[in-house]
Amino acid sequence: MQYFCDRILVMYLGRIVEVLPRGAMPTHPYTIALLDSAFVPDPHNRRDIPRIRGEIPSGYDEPRGCAFASRCPLVEDRCHSQLPHLKSLSGTHAVACHVKGTAPIILETENAV
């Protein structure tokens, strides 16, 4: 990603789950899995790509809470019933996760896509 952008916006089933600046450590479980699956064009650096387990929810009949709850290794009861809102972790990093999120702070929007 370092050659394409300064900021990464990750979506799952049409909802933003994380916004992070280039080089930042991802916090949302889906973002971590997604970035771990990125192709490395070096035959000497082969690695196993972990699969995301669980059922993919229907985009037509969205779940009541977090859309990633049925596949998330960190799932809690509230994840199935309450939709997580995007919360700021810093001025340029935000996550929509009950487990990884913190108190909401306004996200910096300068140069936002």
Image (cartoon, rainbow, N blue to C red):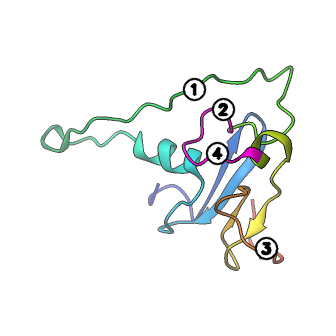
Image x and y of residue 53, in percent: 51, 28
Q: Which mark is in front, 4 or 1?
A: 4
Q: Which mark is in front, 2 or 3?
A: 2
- Which residue appears at 41% of the width and 39% of the height? 37
- Mark 2 highlights which residue? 70
Q: CA distance from mark 2 to mark 1?
A: 6 Å
Tell me which segment is drawn in magenta. Answer: 69-77
Q: Identify which amino acid the numbered label 1 is placed on.
A: Gly
Sequence-wise first label, 2 or 1: 1
Q: CA distance from mark 1 to mark 3?
A: 31 Å
Q: Which mark is in front, 1 or 3?
A: 1
- Which residue appears at 46% of the width and 47% of the height? 35
Q: CA distance from mark 2 to mark 4?
A: 8 Å
- Mark 4 highlights which residue? 75
On the picture, is 42 further left or further right than 99? left
Image x and y of residue 66, in percent: 77, 42
Q: CA distance from mark 4 to mark 1?
A: 12 Å
Q: Which mark is in front, 4 or 3?
A: 4
- Mark 1 highlights which residue? 54
Quick check: is 76 in the magenta stretch? Answer: yes
